[in-house]
Every structure is written in structure tokens, then in C-alpha cells.
């Protein structure tokens, strides 16, 4: 049935039923009193009836006072027969005007039509519903192998490369792709060929999808986008069919760009899965490999893909001719972080004295997504305090919220626990301030956040890409600062140092087995075996003897005790300053960088060199 005709038919039925119920609900202008037929006969004999109206089996009698009585007669008898049987004479009836009317009106027709029409409507509705489901199923069957990718026309919030801070080299790589598609003669005259694919690699939150959206905003060619997971279905062959359809659609619009997000969903290494060569995901991957670099090499379709798991991708996918360019997106440095903060502050009501540089300094290791979340948390803090603008203090507080979680000021601590926490954090801070190779202290607090009872915020003064052995030893000493303080002051130990010990043990083992910083020299130990189909490390191959294993444990223990001894010596020699810092913490709960530095300067503390 034609959809438009069905629509008109449905509207007509609804209007008809509405009118019937509407008029049926209207009461008569004068409500008649229902009585028995004998009562009307009695009023006729008394001479009170001035008119009789007969409509079907209904008799209405109008009295001399204009009131109306209503009754019903036997459907098998006429009006005269019914009244005569009750003793009304012919002479009496001749004196009364009698009007006989045919039944009409909406109530009458509704009484006739609705009992027959409603079942028909119900049956017709069921038939229509079943036909529609059958047609829908047939339509889905016909389009089951079609791709669900979308053509970029204009996102709600269109972005360009000017909206992406930093990533200058990465943007240049992608801008060349766009320019190649828009002006191919410029490159073909020199014999250059367009890259077939660009793979965006980087940790989560570094802006891979954002960069692809910027390409869509900059591109003057059709831009198709979809997620890799949309290729895969439970039925074998559907993913390959959707892949063919996606590339065929992009080829028809060539020159064009096809963006596949999270390509590791279908691009994982073949032969490592549970399904073998007949696995649906592997068939989809095989089809992508053929489409990107098969017999047909004249296609002017550039594929851009994004992933944060390049280690699990199939080698055939990464070779030149398929993904020719690998664009690595790193975590932003201090200048990029400042620029990213300014971009995410565009729609925020900020105070005039906001300075983003200190925020960028305090956020090493933050990705673009982390910085966006930081700005949002700052706006939430300001709204929670009923402020009209976001202030610098809101930004600083949001850093700790993103790093450690929300403050838990209502968590009840006993006096003893509070004192232990204060000395523990004072120990961390004092050791960090005493060593040249340790990161400077930016904040010390005994206010609980997340799982931590207190925390010492240490941040480097500049971005680092390398770390030396002395810096690792300094880090170990700082981690043992809380543990050594509890032992020194209370002659006892608590569970507060459990995470410090775990991190310190991990660092010491990596120094020996991965970084070649132990007595073994330039050697590494252990080879990680990764089960690709599970997507995580499963086992570590032990490629050394039991004798070497014992020596590795001994060397790890040496580094641990070296850091612990260094922390303990510092705290013993500077116990008085340790107590001053702890007392200040118990009094103020939080010491900012300026307050902590003032305490250190008063004592004229000299920083020590780490000796190996």
C-alpha cells in the first residue's frame, strides 16, 4: 500500500471516530426523564400530554408544562398497538399530535457502523503491521551488506586546523594530502604519487579523531567517515561486503577521503585469533588490503585511519602502498598545553587575570582530552561556588581533581591517623626538596583525595623525554620518604606506603631488566609475549638462567635499599625541619609551593647530589 494513501486513510478513520465520539458526548438541549410506558399512558388519560414523538422504539411525550418524558416500546409492536394494549382509546389518541421520525444522527450511525468497523480496523491494522515488518526485513536483507558510512557536509561545530593547537608537523602532513587531492597537477608534474593511506598513531586523547575532523573541515573534496567496528557483523562475509561498498562509494566520488576510526578493531594481526583464516574480522581485513593496494591502482581515494594500538596491527596493513604515512601524535609539550588550554577556554567566562602558563607547567603528561576535561571541571567548580567567572584557583583545583579525584574533607580521621599522614607527606616533600635530581614540590596536602589519605604534588620544571639513573634513584628516595619517616618518628609502619613500595619496586626492576642501569651493563632480560587477540600482555618469556634471576633480584634489592638509605639519612639529619613541615601541615592541611619554599629557605637547606 502506498505510504501517502495509507496516511490519508488512517487520518480519515481517526477523524471519523473523533467526530462520532464528539457528537455522542453532547447531551440533548433538554434532558428527558425516563419513565415506564404505563406512566406515559397514565399522563395521556389525565390529558397532560400535548405531543408524542416516536423515533424507532423510543417514545417521547411532551407535557403541558413543556417537560419531556421518554420510554421505550416493544420493537415488535407499533405505537398505536402498544398504547391500545394498555387501554388508550382511539378517540384519545386522535386528540394528541403524534409524530413518527426515522432514526438518524451520528449516534445512530455509530451504533450501526462501529460494531462492524472496529473489528475490520483491528484486522486491517494487524495485516498492515505484518506487511510492513516483512517489507522492512526484506529491505534490511537487501542492505545488510551496505556500509553505514556518512558523508561529511557540515558538522554542528565545524573545526579546522586553526582549532587544533600544536601538532604543526602532523597538520602539515595532512594538509599535503588535502592539497594533493585538490591540486593533483602540482605533484603529478614532478612524478609524485598520492599516498594511499595515512595512519594516525598516538595515546588516547592526543587528538587523532579531532585532527581527522579538522581535515574534513579543510578538505575541498568529499570526506566519508565511519568506525571500523561498523564493518564487522556476526555473519561471515558481511564485513567484506561492507568494505567493498564503502570503497566503491568513495571511488564514485573520487577524489575523496575515507576516514576509518579505531582501525585496530578489524586490522589486528592475522593468524593470531581464535577463528583462524575463516574469521569474519580477518576476511574484512583481507578486503581492505585488496581495496587499498590490489589490481586497481588508479583510484584517487586516500584512506585516513586512527588507532592507539599500532602494535597489534597486521604488518601487511602497515607496509608502503597501503598506509604510506604514519603520523605519530605525542602528548603535548608545555607550549602546546598552554595553546590547548586557550582553545578550550574560548566558550568559558574567565576572569581577566587568568594565567595559563602555571596551569601548563603543572600538567605534564596531560593529553588534549585531559586538558579539555580540566577546563570543564574548573567551570563546574566556579558554578558550584556561585561565581560569575572562572578564576585561577578553580583551574588549579581542577588539576588535582583530574589527577587524584575529588576532595574528601568529610572523611573522618583519628588524631593519630592525621598525625601519621602529616609526617608521611612531610617526609616525601623534605626528601624531594633535599635532592638536586628530584622534581620540585608544588603542593603538599593531608586532605584526602580519591584513595590517597594525603599527597605530595611533584612536577618537573620542563618536559622530559629521557630520564637518567640519578633521577631514578632520587625518585626512589622520595618514594621511600614517607615510609622512612614513619619508621623514624613513630618507630612503626602503616599501610599508607603500600602504593609507594609497589611503584618503587617496579621502577627498580625496570632499571635492571630494561634500562641496563644495573651491574649487568648493557643487557636486557625477559621478552614479553603478547596474545594479540586478547589485546594485552599475557606472559613474559624468561630468557635467562636461575642464577641470573637470583642476581637480578639482588640488584633490584640493591637499588631499593640505596633509595631507602638515602631517604633515611636525609630525614635523620633534618629531623627538626621535618617536624616543622609536619606541624604546619596539621595546622593548615595544605601547603602551596610558595609556603613550602618559604619553610625551606628559612632553614637554609642545601640540596644534595645523588651518589651511586
Image (spheres, rainbow, N blue to C red):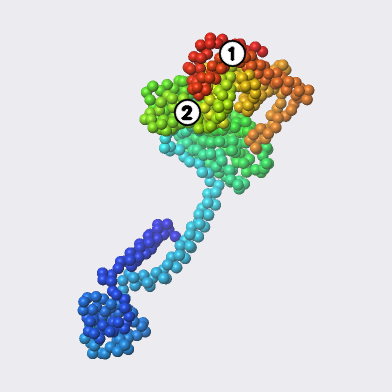
Work out whether residue 437 or residue 599 is closer to the camera in this orientation and state it: 599
Identify residue for label 1: 574
Where does residue 151 sit, x and y in percent of width and height?
Answer: 46, 40
Image quarter of the C terminus: top right
Residue 591 visible: yes
Q: Are marks 1 and 2 in contact (CB under 8 Å)?
A: no
First-in-chain label (1 vs 2): 2
Structural distance between the alpha carbons of marks 1 and 2: 33 Å
State the image coordinates of residue 527 (x, y, percent, origin top left): 70, 27
Left or right: where 82 falls relative to 153: left
Residue visible at 26% across and 83% down in the picture: 43
Q: In this view, does 463 lie above or below 9?
A: above
Q: Position of residue 480 (x, y in %)?
A: 63, 21
Q: Looking at the picture, how far across and down is residue 313, in whole percent?
A: 62, 33
Residue reaching furthest to the front: 415
- The residue that mark 2 highlights is 398
Disc number placed over residue 291 in the picture, else none? none
| Numbered disc 2: secondary structure | helix
Q: In this view, does 192 lie to the left or right of 343?
A: right
**Picture residue at 73% right of the left edge, 20% below the top:** 554
Q: How crowded is mark 2: few (under 14 residues within 10 Å), some or many (20 or more)?
A: many
- Residue at position x 63%, y 17% in the image: 567
- In this rendering, the answer to whether 509 lies above or below 68 is above
Instruction: Determine if residue 470 is in view.
Output: no
**Residue for point 32% across, 82% down:** 37
Up the image or down, 253 lies above or below 47; here it is above
Amino acid at each position: 500500500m502506498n505510504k501517502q494513501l495509507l496516511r490519508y486513510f488512517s487520518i480519515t478513520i481517526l477523524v471519523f471516530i473523533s467526530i462520532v465520539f464528539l457528537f455522542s458526548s453532547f447531551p440533548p438541549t433538554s434532558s428527558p426523564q425516563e419513565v415506564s410506558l404505563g406512566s406515559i399512558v397514565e399522563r395521556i388519560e389525565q390529558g397532560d400530554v400535548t405531543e408524542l414523538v416516536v423515533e424507532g422504539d423510543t417514545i417521547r411525550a411532551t407535557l403541558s408544562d413543556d417537560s419531556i418524558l421518554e420510554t421505550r416500546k416493544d420493537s415488535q409492536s407499533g405505537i398505536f398497538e402498544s398504547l391500545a394494549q394498555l387501554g388508550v382509546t382511539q378517540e384519545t389518541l386522535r386528540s394528541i399530535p403524534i409524530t413518527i421520525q426515522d432514526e438518524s444522527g451520528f449516534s445512530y450511525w455509530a451504533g450501526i457502523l462501529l460494531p462492524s468497523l472496529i473489528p475490520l480496523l483491528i484486522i486491517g491494522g494487524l495485516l498492515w503491521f505484518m506487511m510492513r515488518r516483512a517489507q522492512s526485513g526484506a529491505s534490511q536483507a537487501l542492505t545488510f551488506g551496505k556500509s553505514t558510512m556518512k558523508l561529511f557536509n557540515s558538522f554542528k561545530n565545524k573545526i579546522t586546523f586553526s582549532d587544533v593547537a600544536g601538532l604543526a608537523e602532523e597538520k602539515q602532513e595532512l594538509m599535503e594530502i588535502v592539497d594533493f587531492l585538490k591540486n593533483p597537477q602540482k605533484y603529478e608534474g614532478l612524478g609524485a604519487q598520492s599516498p594511499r593511506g595515512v595512519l594516525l598513531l598516538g595515546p588516547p586523547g592526543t587528538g587523532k579523531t579531532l585532527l581527522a575532523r579538522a581535515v574534513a573541515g579543510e578538505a575541498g573534496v568529499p570526506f566519508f567517515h565511519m568506525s571500523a567496528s561498523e564493518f564487522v557483523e556476526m555473519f561471515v562475509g558481511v564485513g567484506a561486503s561492507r568494505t567493498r561498498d564503502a570503497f566503491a562509494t568513495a571511488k564514485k566520488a573520487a577524489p575523496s577521503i575515507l576516514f576509518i576510526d579505531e582501525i585496530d578493531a578489524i586490522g589486528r594481526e592475522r593468524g593470531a585469533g581464535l577463528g583462524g583464516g575463516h574469521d569474519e574480522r580477518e576476511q574484512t581485513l583481507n578486503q581492505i588490503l585488496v581495496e587499498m593496494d590490489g589490481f586497481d591502482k588508479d583510484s584517487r581515494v586516500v584512506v585516513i585511519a586512527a588507532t592507539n594500538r599500532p602494535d597489534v596491527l597486521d604488518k601487511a596493513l602497515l607496509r608502503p602502498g597501503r598506509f604510506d604515512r604514519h603520523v605519530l601524535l605525542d602528548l603535548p609539550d608545555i607550549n602546546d598545553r598552554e595553546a590547548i588550554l586557550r582553545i578550550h577556554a574560548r566558550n568559558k567566562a574567565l576572569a581577566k587575570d587568568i594565567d595559563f602558563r602555571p596551569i601548563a607547567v603543572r600538567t605534564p603528561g596531560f593529553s588534549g582530552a585531559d586538558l579539555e576535561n580540566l577546563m570543564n571541571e574548573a567551570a563546574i567548580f566556579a558554578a558550584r561556588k556561585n561565581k560569575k567567572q572562572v578564576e585561577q584557583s578553580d583551574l588549579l583545583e581542577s588539576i588535582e581533581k583530574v589527577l587524584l579525584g575529588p576532595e574528601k574533607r568529610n572523611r573522618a580521621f583519628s588524631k593519630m591517623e592525621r598525625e601519621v599522614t602529616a609526617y608521611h607527606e612531610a617526609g616525601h616533600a623534605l626528601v624531594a626538596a633535599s635532592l638536586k635530581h628530584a622534581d620540585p614540590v608544588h603542593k603538599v596536602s593531608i586532605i584526602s583525595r580519591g584513595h590517597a589519605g594525603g599527597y605530595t604534588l611533584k612536577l618537573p620544571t620542563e618536559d622530559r623525554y629521557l630520564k637518567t639513573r640519578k633521577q631514578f634513584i632520587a625518585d626512589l628516595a622520595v618514594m621511600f620518604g614517607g615510609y622512612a619517616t614513619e619508621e623514624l618518628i613513630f618507630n612503626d609502619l602503616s599501610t599508607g606506603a603500600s602504593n609507594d613500595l609497589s611503584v618503587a619496586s617496579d621502577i627498580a626492576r625496570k632499571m635492571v631488566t630494561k634500562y641496563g642501569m644495573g651491574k649487568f651493563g648493557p643487557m636486557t632480560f625477559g621478552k614479553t609475549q603478547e596474545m594479540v587477540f586478547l589485546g594485552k600482555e599475557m606472559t613474559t618469556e624468561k630468557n635467562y638462567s636461575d642464577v641470573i634471576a637470583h642476581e637480578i633480584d639482588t640488584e633490584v634489592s640493591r637499588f631499593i635499599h640505596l633509595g631507602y638509605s638515602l631517604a633515611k639519612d636525609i630525614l635523620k639529619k633534618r629531623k627538626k625541619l621535618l617536624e616543622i613541615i609536619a606541624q604546619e601541615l596539621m595546622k593548615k592541611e595544605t601547603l602551596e609551593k610558595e609556603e613550602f619554599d618559604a619553610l625551606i629557605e628559612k632553614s637554609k637547606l642545601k640540596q644534595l647530589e645523588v651518589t651511586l
